[in-house]
Amino acid sequence: MDQAVAAPSRALDLGLAWKHSFSGLGPAFRTDLSPTPLAAPYMVSLNTKLSTQLGVDAQLLSSPDGVAALAGSLPLAGQRPLASVYSGHQFGVWAGQLGDGRAILLGDIETPQGPQELQFKGSGLTPYSRMGDGRAVLRSSIREYLCSEAMHGLGIPTTRALSVTGSPQPVRREEIETAAVVLRVAPSFIRFGHFEHFSAREQYGELRRLADYVIDQFYPECRLTERFAGNPYAALLERVSERTAAMVAQWQAAGFCHGVMNTDNMSILGLTIDYGPFQFLDAFVPNHVCNHSDEQGRYAFNRQPNVAYWNLFCLGQALLPLVGEQELALAALESYKTVFPRELQARMRAKLGLADQQDGDRELVEDILKLLAADRVDYPIFWRRLSHLAAGSPAEPVRDLFMDRAAADTWLHSWLARLPADRSAAGIAMLATNPKYVLRNHLCELAIRQAKLQDHSEVETLLRLVQAPYDEHPDQEAKAGFPPDWAAHIEISCSS
Ligand code: AMP
Ligand code: MG
Protein backbone atom coordinates (compact mmCIF):
# COMPACT_ATOMS: atom_id res chain seq x y z
CA MET A 1 0.00 0.00 0.00
CA ASP A 2 1.23 3.46 -0.78
CA GLN A 3 2.15 4.99 2.58
CA ALA A 4 2.83 8.42 1.17
CA VAL A 5 0.78 11.12 2.81
CA ALA A 6 -0.06 14.18 0.78
CA ALA A 7 1.76 17.25 2.07
CA PRO A 8 -0.70 19.46 3.92
CA SER A 9 -1.67 22.24 1.56
CA ARG A 10 -0.64 25.68 2.70
CA ALA A 11 -3.30 27.77 4.40
CA LEU A 12 -3.46 31.05 6.30
CA ASP A 13 -4.29 30.52 9.95
CA LEU A 14 -6.18 33.49 11.35
CA GLY A 15 -7.16 31.56 14.47
CA LEU A 16 -10.82 31.75 13.53
CA ALA A 17 -13.42 29.75 15.47
CA TRP A 18 -15.33 28.11 12.61
CA LYS A 19 -18.81 26.64 13.02
CA HIS A 20 -19.99 25.73 9.49
CA SER A 21 -23.64 26.02 10.42
CA PHE A 22 -25.02 26.32 6.88
CA SER A 23 -22.99 23.36 5.70
CA GLY A 24 -24.73 21.30 8.38
CA LEU A 25 -28.03 21.66 6.52
CA GLY A 26 -26.89 18.87 4.25
CA PRO A 27 -25.82 18.15 0.71
CA ALA A 28 -29.13 19.17 -0.90
CA PHE A 29 -28.34 22.78 -0.09
CA ARG A 30 -24.86 23.09 -1.49
CA THR A 31 -21.93 21.98 -3.58
CA ASP A 32 -18.58 21.85 -1.84
CA LEU A 33 -15.85 23.41 -3.90
CA SER A 34 -12.85 25.69 -3.58
CA PRO A 35 -12.44 29.22 -4.86
CA THR A 36 -10.46 29.45 -8.09
CA PRO A 37 -7.19 31.27 -7.36
CA LEU A 38 -6.69 34.65 -8.98
CA ALA A 39 -3.33 35.56 -10.48
CA ALA A 40 -1.13 38.15 -8.77
CA PRO A 41 -3.70 39.41 -6.27
CA TYR A 42 -3.28 42.86 -4.76
CA MET A 43 -5.11 44.71 -2.00
CA VAL A 44 -7.52 47.43 -3.05
CA SER A 45 -8.91 48.12 0.41
CA LEU A 46 -9.12 46.44 3.79
CA ASN A 47 -11.93 47.48 6.11
CA THR A 48 -9.95 47.67 9.33
CA LYS A 49 -12.98 48.90 11.29
CA LEU A 50 -14.77 45.68 10.44
CA SER A 51 -11.73 43.47 11.02
CA THR A 52 -11.44 44.96 14.50
CA GLN A 53 -15.13 44.35 15.16
CA LEU A 54 -14.73 40.76 14.04
CA GLY A 55 -11.57 40.29 16.08
CA VAL A 56 -9.57 39.41 12.96
CA ASP A 57 -5.93 40.49 12.74
CA ALA A 58 -5.72 43.32 10.17
CA GLN A 59 -1.93 43.14 10.00
CA LEU A 60 -2.03 39.50 9.07
CA LEU A 61 -4.67 40.23 6.45
CA SER A 62 -2.45 42.92 4.94
CA SER A 63 0.51 40.56 4.55
CA PRO A 64 1.12 38.90 1.16
CA ASP A 65 -0.50 35.70 2.44
CA GLY A 66 -3.41 37.75 3.80
CA VAL A 67 -3.98 39.39 0.44
CA ALA A 68 -3.82 36.02 -1.30
CA ALA A 69 -6.33 34.63 1.20
CA LEU A 70 -8.72 37.57 0.75
CA ALA A 71 -8.59 37.00 -3.01
CA GLY A 72 -9.42 33.31 -2.65
CA SER A 73 -5.95 32.34 -3.85
CA LEU A 74 -4.80 30.86 -0.52
CA PRO A 75 -7.20 28.94 1.74
CA LEU A 76 -8.01 30.07 5.26
CA ALA A 77 -7.25 27.34 7.78
CA GLY A 78 -10.53 25.73 8.78
CA GLN A 79 -12.66 26.96 5.88
CA ARG A 80 -15.16 24.58 4.25
CA PRO A 81 -16.00 26.39 1.06
CA LEU A 82 -19.32 25.81 -0.68
CA ALA A 83 -21.75 27.29 -3.16
CA SER A 84 -25.43 27.21 -2.19
CA VAL A 85 -28.36 26.54 -4.46
CA TYR A 86 -31.36 28.86 -4.72
CA SER A 87 -33.95 29.92 -7.26
CA GLY A 88 -35.91 33.10 -7.70
CA HIS A 89 -38.19 35.50 -9.49
CA GLN A 90 -36.24 37.92 -11.65
CA PHE A 91 -38.04 41.02 -12.91
CA GLY A 92 -41.36 39.47 -11.96
CA VAL A 93 -40.80 36.21 -13.80
CA TRP A 94 -39.97 32.80 -12.33
CA ALA A 95 -36.36 32.15 -13.31
CA GLY A 96 -35.95 28.65 -11.87
CA GLN A 97 -32.63 27.59 -10.44
CA LEU A 98 -29.97 30.26 -9.94
CA GLY A 99 -27.63 29.74 -6.97
CA ASP A 100 -24.25 31.10 -5.96
CA GLY A 101 -22.86 31.52 -9.44
CA ARG A 102 -19.89 33.52 -8.32
CA ALA A 103 -20.17 33.52 -4.54
CA ILE A 104 -18.47 30.99 -2.30
CA LEU A 105 -19.28 30.66 1.39
CA LEU A 106 -16.32 29.78 3.60
CA GLY A 107 -18.38 29.10 6.73
CA ASP A 108 -19.41 31.07 9.79
CA ILE A 109 -17.09 32.15 12.58
CA GLU A 110 -17.66 33.14 16.18
CA THR A 111 -17.09 36.88 16.61
CA PRO A 112 -17.81 39.46 19.31
CA GLN A 113 -20.80 40.39 17.06
CA GLY A 114 -22.12 36.82 17.16
CA PRO A 115 -21.64 34.23 14.42
CA GLN A 116 -20.83 35.76 11.05
CA GLU A 117 -20.57 34.07 7.68
CA LEU A 118 -17.65 34.88 5.40
CA GLN A 119 -18.49 34.78 1.71
CA PHE A 120 -16.44 35.59 -1.38
CA LYS A 121 -18.05 37.26 -4.35
CA GLY A 122 -16.21 36.83 -7.64
CA SER A 123 -14.16 33.81 -6.61
CA GLY A 124 -14.67 31.62 -9.65
CA LEU A 125 -17.01 29.19 -11.35
CA THR A 126 -19.52 27.06 -9.46
CA PRO A 127 -22.12 24.56 -10.69
CA TYR A 128 -24.59 27.49 -10.54
CA SER A 129 -22.62 29.85 -12.78
CA ARG A 130 -24.89 29.15 -15.78
CA MET A 131 -23.58 31.39 -18.60
CA GLY A 132 -21.43 33.48 -16.25
CA ASP A 133 -17.70 33.32 -15.66
CA GLY A 134 -17.83 33.25 -11.87
CA ARG A 135 -15.97 36.53 -11.67
CA ALA A 136 -16.74 40.10 -10.64
CA VAL A 137 -15.01 43.15 -12.08
CA LEU A 138 -13.07 45.75 -10.09
CA ARG A 139 -15.64 48.48 -10.77
CA SER A 140 -18.63 46.61 -9.33
CA SER A 141 -16.61 45.16 -6.48
CA ILE A 142 -15.57 48.63 -5.32
CA ARG A 143 -19.21 49.73 -5.55
CA GLU A 144 -20.40 46.80 -3.44
CA TYR A 145 -17.63 47.27 -0.89
CA LEU A 146 -18.26 50.98 -0.44
CA CYS A 147 -22.02 50.76 -0.47
CA SER A 148 -22.26 48.01 2.14
CA GLU A 149 -20.23 50.21 4.43
CA ALA A 150 -22.21 53.32 3.48
CA MET A 151 -25.45 51.57 4.40
CA HIS A 152 -23.95 50.37 7.66
CA GLY A 153 -22.73 53.91 8.36
CA LEU A 154 -26.30 55.14 7.90
CA GLY A 155 -27.62 52.49 10.28
CA ILE A 156 -29.41 50.56 7.52
CA PRO A 157 -29.35 46.76 7.87
CA THR A 158 -26.92 45.34 5.34
CA THR A 159 -24.36 42.69 4.57
CA ARG A 160 -20.88 44.06 5.18
CA ALA A 161 -17.60 43.88 3.31
CA LEU A 162 -14.19 43.17 4.80
CA SER A 163 -12.03 43.70 1.73
CA VAL A 164 -11.69 44.19 -1.98
CA THR A 165 -8.76 42.56 -3.66
CA GLY A 166 -7.94 42.90 -7.33
CA SER A 167 -5.99 41.00 -9.94
CA PRO A 168 -4.68 41.84 -13.40
CA GLN A 169 -6.61 38.80 -14.66
CA PRO A 170 -8.84 39.98 -17.51
CA VAL A 171 -12.62 39.64 -17.33
CA ARG A 172 -14.84 40.19 -20.35
CA ARG A 173 -17.88 42.41 -19.95
CA GLU A 174 -18.91 45.08 -22.52
CA GLU A 175 -15.19 45.65 -22.66
CA ILE A 176 -12.25 43.83 -21.12
CA GLU A 177 -11.93 44.69 -17.45
CA THR A 178 -10.02 43.12 -14.55
CA ALA A 179 -11.13 40.74 -11.82
CA ALA A 180 -11.71 41.52 -8.16
CA VAL A 181 -13.07 39.73 -5.11
CA VAL A 182 -15.11 41.13 -2.24
CA LEU A 183 -15.15 39.28 1.05
CA ARG A 184 -18.64 39.78 2.40
CA VAL A 185 -19.72 39.31 6.00
CA ALA A 186 -23.23 38.73 7.37
CA PRO A 187 -24.94 36.50 9.93
CA SER A 188 -26.46 34.69 6.95
CA PHE A 189 -26.66 35.04 3.19
CA ILE A 190 -29.89 33.05 2.93
CA ARG A 191 -32.33 34.64 0.48
CA PHE A 192 -36.05 34.35 -0.20
CA GLY A 193 -34.92 32.37 -3.24
CA HIS A 194 -33.51 29.57 -1.09
CA PHE A 195 -37.05 28.89 0.14
CA GLU A 196 -38.56 29.26 -3.31
CA HIS A 197 -36.10 26.69 -4.62
CA PHE A 198 -37.13 23.82 -2.37
CA SER A 199 -40.79 24.76 -2.44
CA ALA A 200 -40.93 24.84 -6.25
CA ARG A 201 -39.30 21.42 -6.36
CA GLU A 202 -41.72 20.10 -3.77
CA GLN A 203 -38.74 19.13 -1.59
CA TYR A 204 -40.73 19.85 1.53
CA GLY A 205 -38.35 18.03 3.88
CA GLU A 206 -35.56 20.36 2.82
CA LEU A 207 -37.92 23.32 2.94
CA ARG A 208 -38.76 22.52 6.54
CA ARG A 209 -35.13 21.98 7.45
CA LEU A 210 -34.23 25.35 6.00
CA ALA A 211 -37.07 27.12 7.81
CA ASP A 212 -36.24 25.39 11.10
CA TYR A 213 -32.60 26.38 10.67
CA VAL A 214 -33.46 30.02 10.07
CA ILE A 215 -35.88 30.08 12.99
CA ASP A 216 -33.48 28.38 15.41
CA GLN A 217 -30.51 30.51 14.40
CA PHE A 218 -32.12 33.90 13.89
CA TYR A 219 -35.77 34.00 14.90
CA PRO A 220 -36.08 31.77 17.99
CA GLU A 221 -39.03 33.90 19.15
CA CYS A 222 -41.12 32.27 16.40
CA ARG A 223 -41.28 29.09 18.47
CA LEU A 224 -42.66 30.93 21.48
CA THR A 225 -45.46 32.90 19.90
CA GLU A 226 -49.09 32.10 20.53
CA ARG A 227 -50.06 34.07 17.46
CA PHE A 228 -51.02 32.17 14.32
CA ALA A 229 -52.19 29.28 16.47
CA GLY A 230 -48.57 28.71 17.50
CA ASN A 231 -47.48 28.12 13.88
CA PRO A 232 -43.76 29.02 13.84
CA TYR A 233 -43.61 29.24 10.03
CA ALA A 234 -46.37 31.85 9.89
CA ALA A 235 -44.54 33.67 12.67
CA LEU A 236 -41.35 33.52 10.60
CA LEU A 237 -43.14 35.03 7.61
CA GLU A 238 -44.42 37.81 9.83
CA ARG A 239 -41.00 38.56 11.30
CA VAL A 240 -39.37 38.62 7.87
CA SER A 241 -42.16 40.92 6.65
CA GLU A 242 -41.54 43.26 9.55
CA ARG A 243 -37.79 43.35 9.03
CA THR A 244 -38.15 43.85 5.30
CA ALA A 245 -40.65 46.64 5.89
CA ALA A 246 -38.28 48.38 8.30
CA MET A 247 -35.38 48.00 5.87
CA VAL A 248 -37.27 49.39 2.87
CA ALA A 249 -38.59 52.28 4.98
CA GLN A 250 -34.97 53.16 5.67
CA TRP A 251 -34.13 52.90 1.97
CA GLN A 252 -36.92 55.30 1.08
CA ALA A 253 -35.98 57.80 3.77
CA ALA A 254 -32.31 57.67 2.75
CA GLY A 255 -33.13 57.99 -0.97
CA PHE A 256 -31.57 54.60 -1.71
CA CYS A 257 -32.51 52.79 -4.87
CA HIS A 258 -31.49 49.10 -4.89
CA GLY A 259 -31.93 48.51 -8.60
CA VAL A 260 -32.44 44.72 -8.75
CA MET A 261 -35.02 43.66 -6.17
CA ASN A 262 -35.37 40.12 -7.49
CA THR A 263 -36.42 37.55 -4.89
CA ASP A 264 -32.94 36.03 -5.01
CA ASN A 265 -31.61 39.42 -3.88
CA MET A 266 -33.85 39.58 -0.80
CA SER A 267 -32.27 38.55 2.50
CA ILE A 268 -34.25 36.39 4.92
CA LEU A 269 -32.75 38.57 7.68
CA GLY A 270 -33.99 41.83 6.17
CA LEU A 271 -30.49 42.93 5.18
CA THR A 272 -29.70 44.95 2.09
CA ILE A 273 -27.86 42.46 -0.10
CA ASP A 274 -26.29 42.18 -3.56
CA TYR A 275 -25.19 45.65 -4.52
CA GLY A 276 -25.31 46.06 -8.27
CA PRO A 277 -26.73 49.08 -10.09
CA PHE A 278 -27.81 50.78 -6.82
CA GLN A 279 -27.95 54.54 -6.48
CA PHE A 280 -28.47 57.12 -3.80
CA LEU A 281 -30.72 59.77 -5.32
CA ASP A 282 -29.15 63.05 -6.29
CA ALA A 283 -32.19 65.10 -7.38
CA PHE A 284 -35.42 63.88 -5.80
CA VAL A 285 -37.10 62.10 -8.70
CA PRO A 286 -39.61 59.66 -7.18
CA ASN A 287 -39.84 57.38 -10.21
CA HIS A 288 -36.09 57.33 -10.80
CA VAL A 289 -34.79 54.06 -12.28
CA CYS A 290 -31.13 53.53 -11.41
CA ASN A 291 -30.65 50.25 -13.30
CA HIS A 292 -30.01 50.92 -16.97
CA SER A 293 -31.11 47.35 -17.77
CA ASP A 294 -34.53 47.87 -16.12
CA GLU A 295 -36.39 49.13 -19.16
CA GLN A 296 -39.87 48.79 -17.63
CA GLY A 297 -38.88 50.66 -14.48
CA ARG A 298 -40.02 47.74 -12.34
CA TYR A 299 -37.53 48.69 -9.65
CA ALA A 300 -38.03 52.46 -9.77
CA PHE A 301 -37.34 54.21 -6.46
CA ASN A 302 -41.00 54.78 -5.60
CA ARG A 303 -41.97 51.22 -6.49
CA GLN A 304 -39.58 49.61 -4.02
CA PRO A 305 -42.10 49.38 -1.17
CA ASN A 306 -44.62 47.56 -3.38
CA VAL A 307 -41.98 45.32 -4.89
CA ALA A 308 -40.81 44.30 -1.42
CA TYR A 309 -44.36 43.25 -0.63
CA TRP A 310 -44.60 41.35 -3.92
CA ASN A 311 -41.38 39.55 -3.00
CA LEU A 312 -42.70 38.75 0.46
CA PHE A 313 -45.78 37.33 -1.20
CA CYS A 314 -43.49 34.97 -3.15
CA LEU A 315 -41.84 33.98 0.10
CA GLY A 316 -45.29 33.40 1.60
CA GLN A 317 -46.21 31.13 -1.29
CA ALA A 318 -42.96 29.24 -0.87
CA LEU A 319 -43.64 28.76 2.85
CA LEU A 320 -47.26 27.74 2.32
CA PRO A 321 -46.59 23.98 2.49
CA LEU A 322 -45.22 24.59 6.00
CA VAL A 323 -47.70 27.24 7.10
CA GLY A 324 -50.59 25.06 5.99
CA GLU A 325 -53.44 27.55 5.73
CA GLN A 326 -53.46 30.37 3.24
CA GLU A 327 -55.29 32.63 5.72
CA LEU A 328 -52.40 32.32 8.17
CA ALA A 329 -49.85 33.25 5.51
CA LEU A 330 -51.93 36.24 4.39
CA ALA A 331 -52.36 37.36 8.00
CA ALA A 332 -48.57 37.15 8.49
CA LEU A 333 -47.96 39.25 5.38
CA GLU A 334 -50.40 41.90 6.63
CA SER A 335 -47.77 43.08 9.10
CA TYR A 336 -45.88 44.64 6.17
CA LYS A 337 -48.77 46.99 5.54
CA THR A 338 -48.70 48.34 9.07
CA VAL A 339 -44.98 48.27 9.73
CA PHE A 340 -43.84 49.90 6.48
CA PRO A 341 -45.90 53.13 6.77
CA ARG A 342 -45.23 53.36 10.49
CA GLU A 343 -41.48 52.97 10.04
CA LEU A 344 -41.38 55.33 7.07
CA GLN A 345 -43.25 58.02 8.99
CA ALA A 346 -40.92 57.58 11.96
CA ARG A 347 -37.86 57.91 9.70
CA MET A 348 -39.23 60.96 7.95
CA ARG A 349 -40.21 62.60 11.23
CA ALA A 350 -36.65 62.06 12.45
CA LYS A 351 -35.34 63.70 9.27
CA LEU A 352 -37.59 66.66 10.08
CA GLY A 353 -36.36 66.88 13.67
CA LEU A 354 -39.69 65.81 15.15
CA ALA A 355 -39.20 63.55 18.13
CA ASP A 356 -42.88 62.90 18.81
CA GLN A 357 -45.85 62.20 16.58
CA GLN A 358 -48.61 64.76 16.02
CA ASP A 359 -51.58 65.26 13.72
CA GLY A 360 -50.51 66.87 10.50
CA ASP A 361 -47.04 65.30 10.42
CA ARG A 362 -47.95 63.05 7.53
CA GLU A 363 -49.05 66.09 5.49
CA LEU A 364 -45.84 67.89 6.38
CA VAL A 365 -43.85 64.98 4.96
CA GLU A 366 -46.05 64.61 1.88
CA ASP A 367 -45.92 68.31 1.15
CA ILE A 368 -42.15 68.60 1.27
CA LEU A 369 -41.68 65.50 -0.89
CA LYS A 370 -44.02 67.05 -3.47
CA LEU A 371 -42.04 70.27 -3.47
CA LEU A 372 -38.72 68.42 -3.71
CA ALA A 373 -40.05 66.42 -6.65
CA ALA A 374 -41.54 69.44 -8.41
CA ASP A 375 -38.22 71.30 -8.37
CA ARG A 376 -36.01 68.19 -8.58
CA VAL A 377 -34.20 69.40 -5.51
CA ASP A 378 -31.01 67.61 -4.50
CA TYR A 379 -32.20 65.18 -1.82
CA PRO A 380 -29.17 64.89 0.51
CA ILE A 381 -28.33 68.59 0.32
CA PHE A 382 -31.89 69.63 1.12
CA TRP A 383 -31.97 67.58 4.32
CA ARG A 384 -28.54 68.66 5.44
CA ARG A 385 -29.32 72.32 4.89
CA LEU A 386 -32.64 71.95 6.67
CA SER A 387 -30.79 70.46 9.62
CA HIS A 388 -28.51 73.48 9.75
CA LEU A 389 -31.51 75.77 9.59
CA ALA A 390 -33.00 74.07 12.64
CA ALA A 391 -29.63 74.35 14.37
CA GLY A 392 -29.71 78.13 13.91
CA SER A 393 -28.39 78.91 10.41
CA PRO A 394 -30.28 81.31 8.11
CA ALA A 395 -33.08 79.99 5.87
CA GLU A 396 -31.55 81.24 2.61
CA PRO A 397 -29.51 78.12 1.74
CA VAL A 398 -32.69 76.05 1.98
CA ARG A 399 -34.89 78.55 0.07
CA ASP A 400 -32.24 78.77 -2.65
CA LEU A 401 -32.84 75.12 -3.52
CA PHE A 402 -36.39 75.85 -4.74
CA MET A 403 -37.68 77.56 -7.85
CA ASP A 404 -41.06 78.01 -6.19
CA ARG A 405 -39.90 80.16 -3.28
CA ALA A 406 -43.43 81.01 -2.17
CA ALA A 407 -44.35 77.34 -1.81
CA ALA A 408 -41.07 76.64 -0.01
CA ASP A 409 -41.69 79.54 2.37
CA THR A 410 -45.19 78.32 3.18
CA TRP A 411 -43.87 74.87 3.96
CA LEU A 412 -40.91 76.19 5.97
CA HIS A 413 -43.31 78.32 7.98
CA SER A 414 -45.44 75.31 9.00
CA TRP A 415 -42.38 73.18 9.68
CA LEU A 416 -40.78 75.84 11.90
CA ALA A 417 -44.04 76.22 13.79
CA ARG A 418 -44.10 72.47 14.34
CA LEU A 419 -40.47 72.20 15.50
CA PRO A 420 -40.01 71.79 19.25
CA ALA A 421 -39.21 74.90 21.27
CA ASP A 422 -35.62 73.70 21.68
CA ARG A 423 -34.75 74.13 18.02
CA SER A 424 -31.03 73.70 18.46
CA ALA A 425 -31.51 70.27 20.06
CA ALA A 426 -33.73 69.32 17.12
CA GLY A 427 -31.03 70.62 14.77
CA ILE A 428 -28.34 68.52 16.45
CA ALA A 429 -30.55 65.44 16.18
CA MET A 430 -31.21 66.22 12.50
CA LEU A 431 -27.48 66.56 11.79
CA ALA A 432 -27.08 63.05 13.17
CA THR A 433 -29.93 61.79 10.96
CA ASN A 434 -29.36 63.58 7.66
CA PRO A 435 -25.90 62.66 6.39
CA LYS A 436 -23.46 65.17 5.00
CA TYR A 437 -21.65 62.53 2.92
CA VAL A 438 -23.61 60.21 0.67
CA LEU A 439 -22.10 57.60 -1.66
CA ARG A 440 -23.30 59.28 -4.83
CA ASN A 441 -22.72 57.58 -8.17
CA HIS A 442 -20.21 60.11 -9.39
CA LEU A 443 -18.07 59.75 -6.25
CA CYS A 444 -17.91 56.00 -6.80
CA GLU A 445 -17.13 56.60 -10.43
CA LEU A 446 -14.16 58.86 -9.67
CA ALA A 447 -12.77 56.42 -7.11
CA ILE A 448 -13.12 53.58 -9.63
CA ARG A 449 -11.34 55.52 -12.38
CA GLN A 450 -8.39 56.07 -10.05
CA ALA A 451 -8.42 52.50 -8.82
CA LYS A 452 -8.16 51.30 -12.41
CA LEU A 453 -4.87 53.26 -12.48
CA GLN A 454 -3.71 51.44 -9.32
CA ASP A 455 -4.40 54.43 -7.08
CA HIS A 456 -6.71 53.30 -4.28
CA SER A 457 -6.58 56.48 -2.22
CA GLU A 458 -10.04 57.67 -3.26
CA VAL A 459 -11.55 54.33 -2.27
CA GLU A 460 -9.96 54.81 1.17
CA THR A 461 -11.21 58.37 1.42
CA LEU A 462 -14.76 57.39 0.49
CA LEU A 463 -14.66 54.49 2.94
CA ARG A 464 -13.67 56.90 5.70
CA LEU A 465 -16.45 59.35 4.75
CA VAL A 466 -19.28 56.85 4.41
CA GLN A 467 -18.35 55.13 7.65
CA ALA A 468 -18.88 58.46 9.45
CA PRO A 469 -21.36 60.20 7.13
CA TYR A 470 -22.75 62.63 9.72
CA ASP A 471 -19.34 64.09 10.62
CA GLU A 472 -18.07 67.29 9.02
CA HIS A 473 -14.75 66.07 7.53
CA PRO A 474 -13.77 69.69 6.63
CA ASP A 475 -10.97 68.49 4.31
CA GLN A 476 -13.52 66.74 2.09
CA GLU A 477 -16.12 69.50 1.70
CA ALA A 478 -16.26 69.12 -2.10
CA LYS A 479 -17.62 65.59 -1.77
CA ALA A 480 -20.64 66.97 0.09
CA GLY A 481 -21.54 69.27 -2.79
CA PHE A 482 -23.87 69.00 -5.77
CA PRO A 483 -23.08 66.32 -8.32
CA PRO A 484 -21.40 67.51 -11.53
CA ASP A 485 -23.53 67.62 -14.70
CA TRP A 486 -21.94 64.43 -16.03
CA ALA A 487 -23.31 62.50 -13.05
CA ALA A 488 -26.74 62.50 -14.67
CA HIS A 489 -25.33 60.54 -17.61
CA ILE A 490 -23.68 57.73 -15.66
CA GLU A 491 -25.27 54.49 -16.81
CA ILE A 492 -25.07 51.57 -14.41
CA SER A 493 -26.47 48.28 -15.66
CA CYS A 494 -26.66 44.71 -14.36
CA SER A 495 -23.25 44.08 -15.94
CA SER A 496 -20.89 43.51 -13.08
P1 AMP B 1 -27.50 39.06 -9.67
O1 AMP B 1 -28.36 39.69 -10.71
O2 AMP B 1 -26.13 39.65 -9.57
O3 AMP B 1 -28.18 38.98 -8.35
O4 AMP B 1 -27.23 37.55 -10.15
C1 AMP B 1 -28.25 36.67 -10.48
C2 AMP B 1 -27.69 35.29 -10.64
O5 AMP B 1 -26.68 35.27 -11.64
C3 AMP B 1 -27.06 34.70 -9.41
O6 AMP B 1 -27.29 33.32 -9.42
C4 AMP B 1 -25.60 35.01 -9.60
O7 AMP B 1 -24.76 34.14 -8.89
C5 AMP B 1 -25.46 34.80 -11.09
N1 AMP B 1 -24.35 35.57 -11.67
C6 AMP B 1 -24.27 36.90 -11.87
N2 AMP B 1 -23.11 37.24 -12.43
C7 AMP B 1 -22.41 36.10 -12.60
C8 AMP B 1 -21.13 35.76 -13.13
N3 AMP B 1 -20.31 36.68 -13.64
N4 AMP B 1 -20.76 34.46 -13.13
C9 AMP B 1 -21.56 33.50 -12.64
N5 AMP B 1 -22.77 33.75 -12.14
C10 AMP B 1 -23.20 35.01 -12.11
MG1 MG C 1 -27.88 38.27 -6.63
Image (tube, grey):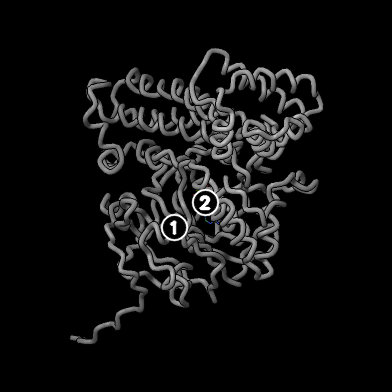
Q: Quadrant of the N terminus?
A: bottom left
- Residue farthest toward the top in the current orientation of the protein: 359
* Image side of residue 86 versus residue 393, left or right: left
Who is closer to the viewer here, 123 or 156? 156
Return the x and y of residue 373 as percentages of the image width and height. 72, 27
Return the x and y of residue 433 as percentages of the image width and height. 55, 37
Q: Which amino acid does label 2 sit on?
A: Glu
Quick one: SS at disc 1? Answer: helix
* Image side of residue 34 versus residue 307, left or right: left
Residue in the image at 53% along x and 66% along y: 165
Return the x and y of residue 161 as percentages of the image width and height. 48, 56
What residue is pinned by disc 1? 50
158 versus 351 height, above or below: below
What residue is pinned by disc 2? 149
Q: Residues within 10 Å of mark 1 (few under 14, many from 20)?
A: some
The picture quadrant where one finds residue 18 is bottom left
- Residue farthest toward the left in the current orientation of the protein: 1
Q: Are marks 1 and 2 in contact (CB under 8 Å)?
A: yes
Q: In which quarter of the image is the C terminus?
A: bottom right
